[in-house]
Image (cartoon, rainbow, N blue to C red):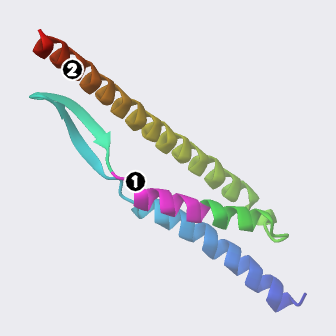
Amino acid sequence: MTVSGINGRLVYCIQSVKEVEETWRKLKFNVQQYTKGTSDRGYILGAIDEVTQTLDDNVMQLQGMLSSRFIGPFLNSVQNWEKSLSHISEVLEVRTIIISISSLFVSYRLLSLNAIVHTHTRV
């Protein structure tokens, strides 16, 4: 490979790491107020479709960089970003699990209420 080819690959690595950094510096999470009845319960993370897509794109970008033989000078930075994005992914997975479990509890309560109403209307 020529010197200009090597320089091009190094520049690509530098630009890719900067792009990931800039993306996550600018990214805004949708946070919504959570209330139950009239009681304020704090804030919850809203829709995450855009965040998930960005996360997936950046993880693929970093994995591609890790497979490059030119990663040497950027290895620590790329590994740190990969670790950070892994933590973000875990948080988003927990959020999805909590939402799923919450909907199961709501469904269970509705079934229980229907059973109670059905029992009392037969009498």
Density class for disc 1 (Cα within 10 Å; few <14, some 14-19, many ≥20) is some
Point out the image quarter for the C terminus. Answer: top left
Specify the segment rendered in magenta: 47-58
Q: Position of residue 61 (x, y in %)?
A: 65, 67
Q: Residue at x 43, y 39 (%)?
A: 95
Q: Is residue 114 left or right of residue 51?
A: left
- Circle 1 — which element? loop
Q: Amino acid at mark 1?
A: Ile
Question: Which numbered disc covers residue 48?
Answer: 1
- Circle 2 — which element? helix
Q: Is residue 103 magenta?
A: no
Q: Is residue 50 magenta?
A: yes
Q: Amino acid at mark 2?
A: Leu
Q: Comparing marks 2 and 1, which lies closer to the viewer?
A: 2
What residue is disc 2 on?
113
- First reached walking from the N terminus: tag 2 or tag 1: 1
Q: Which SS type dominates the magenta stretch?
A: helix
Q: Residue at x 34, y 25 (%)?
A: 105
Residue with the most extreme top position: 123
87 or 52, nearer to the observer: 52
Q: Residue at x 40, y 63 (%)?
A: 26
Q: Position of residue 56 (x, y in %)?
A: 57, 60
Q: Is residue 12 left or right of residue 89?
A: right
